[in-house]
Image: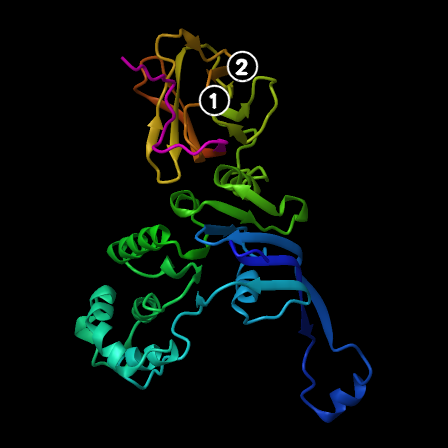
């Protein structure tokens, strides 16, 4: 392994033996004697990549893809069933934070205990104690026993101690899932500092915004082995999001029969009239609203749409006022020439109102889910059609 490589993973596979039911009696043991007492579960297969020194490296994947197992292999907690893991430098795992803490000791005593486990002398821990407590924001609780701490408080204290470790490589596994926003921002500031310091960081998270914010490259890990590999950040984020939205989600929109004027169905299609729920930013999107009516005479109607993001913010709300549509229409199409939305998940509300847009006949509230993908990292809610001029 060359000197500029911090971690090398070469053809690593990991298989666990899952035991069947334990025999709780001598009779059960005799009955099952000679029978296979376990089954094999392969979590990782043939994983290979190299991480450069000073790189902030992401590992992303859906639940059950083997991310935590891979991190524990890097930490030396597990050994590979096949292949090799090589580490070039001193490594500190920020996984299962709080291991080594004693619930019967106070927070103060646990700081010194954990510091000793990291290789610091008592004098060294005493010197950094004030900074550790200040970072954790737990000043008022340091003389309480750890068993009285919430899980979030324990993680905060453990993280505050762990970041003092003198190390070349850090492994971080979703440790920021617990804690309020101000503490998480402290952690992000720390990430920014270590990114500039030249330390190597391996970061496992489901939060793609943090992958975009910190990581230089990322490895995508999934049960679909063909997507496993090393990617640029935009590519990794795009693949991860596609994996999470590859199955069309039906939210109960079927042919609907109602009295009066009603919505029968809603479809999203592309410029080839192909129905789908994953679109590329800048692609054409067509909303087809199929209408039904039990009225004997027709009347003017308005079709209204609302595009919501996953935070329930209304991004756009077009309607057909002034389009002279009446209830005899079989379907109404609304086309977005170029989708301006940034990467993310969106929900569409469709409503049918009277000709003035005042009285509501029918509504399907956030009943259509779709996803917008983009190969390039953008910020904000929408992507503008723009250009730059220099004078």
Q: Residues within 10 Å of mark 1 (few under 14, many from 20)?
A: some
- Tell me which corner region of the image, top left, top right, bottom left or bottom right, holds residue 126: bottom left
The percent position of residue 144, horizontal first and vertical second, equals 23, 81
- Tell me which corner region of the image, top left, top right, bottom left or bottom right, holds residue 18: bottom right
Is the residue 279 above or below the residue 345 in the image? above
Q: In this view of the protein, can residue 93 be seen by the observer?
A: yes
The percent position of residue 45, horizontal first and vertical second, equals 68, 57
Which residue lies most toward the right here?
Answer: 34
Query: Taking 153 as reference, is 277 left or right?
Result: right
Is the residue 336 above or below the residue 221 in the image? above
Q: What numbered label is drawn on residue 129? A: none
Contact between marks 1 and 2 (CB within 8 A): the answer is no
Which of the two residues, 124 or 17, is positioned nearer the viewer here?
124
User: Which is more foreground, mark 1 or mark 2?
Assistant: 1
The residue singled out by tag 2 in the image is 330
Q: Earlier in the sequence, mark 1 or mark 2?
A: 1
Mark-to-mark CA distance, 1 and 2:
29 Å
- Colour scheme of this structure image? rainbow
Which residue lies most toward the left here?
Answer: 140
Asked if the stretch drawn in magenta spans residue 127, the answer is no
| Dominant secondary structure (helix, strand or loop) of the stretch shown in magenta | loop
Give the residue displayed 40% in from the left and 44% down from the top.
209
Q: Residues within 10 Å of mark 2 (few under 14, many from 20)?
A: few
Residue range highlighted in magenta? 371-391
The residue singled out by tag 1 in the image is 282
The residue tagged with tag 2: helix, strand or loop?
loop
């Amino acid at each position: 392994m060359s000197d500029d490589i911090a971690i090398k993973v070469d053809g690593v596979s990991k298989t666990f033996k899952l035991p069947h039911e334990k025999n709780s009696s001598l009779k059960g043991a005799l009955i099952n004697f000679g029978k296979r007492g376990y089954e094999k579960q392969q979590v990782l297969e043939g994983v290979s990549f190299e991480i450069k020194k000073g790189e902030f490296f992401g590992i992303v994947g859906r639940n059950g893809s083997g991310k935590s197992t891979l991190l524990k292999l890097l930490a030396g907690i597990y050994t590979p069933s096949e292949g090799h893991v090589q580490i070039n430098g001193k490594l500190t795992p920020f996984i299962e934070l709080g291991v080594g803490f004693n619930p019967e000791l106070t927070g103060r005593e646990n700081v010194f205990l954990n510091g000793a486990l990291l290789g610091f002398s008592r004098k060294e821990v005493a010197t950094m104690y004030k900074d550790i407590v200040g970072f954790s924001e737990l000043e008022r609780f340091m003389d309480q026993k750890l068993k009285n701490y919430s899980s979030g408080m324990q993680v905060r204290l453990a993280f505050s101690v762990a970041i003092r470790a003198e190390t070349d490589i850090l492994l971080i596994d979703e440790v920021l899932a617990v804690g309020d926003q101000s503490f998480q921002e402290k952690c992000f500031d720390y990430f920014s500092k270590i990114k500039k310091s030249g330390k190597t960081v391996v970061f496992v998270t489901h939060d793609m915004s943090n992958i975009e914010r910190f990581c230089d490259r990322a490895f995508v890990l999934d049960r679909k082995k063909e997507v496993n590999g090393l990617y640029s950040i935009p590519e990794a984020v795009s693949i991860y999001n596609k994996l999470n939205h590859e199955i069309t989600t039906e939210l109960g929109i079927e042919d609907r029969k109602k009295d009066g004027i009603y919505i029968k169905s809603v479809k999203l299609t592309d410029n080839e009239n192909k129905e789908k729920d994953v679109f590329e930013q800048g692609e054409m999107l067509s909303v087809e609203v199929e209408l039904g009516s039990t009225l004997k005479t027709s009347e003017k109607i308005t079709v209204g749409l609302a595009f919501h993001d996953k935070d329930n913010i209304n991004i756009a709300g077009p309607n057909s006022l002034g389009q002279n549509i009446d209830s005899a229409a079989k379907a109404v199409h609304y086309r977005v020439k170029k989708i301006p939305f940034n990467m993310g998940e969106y929900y569409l509300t469709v409503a049918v109102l009277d000709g003035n847009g005042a009285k509501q006949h029918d509504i399907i509230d956030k009943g259509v889910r779709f996803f917008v993908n983009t190969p390039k990292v953008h910020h904000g809610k929408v992507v503008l059609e723009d250009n730059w001029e220099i004078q």
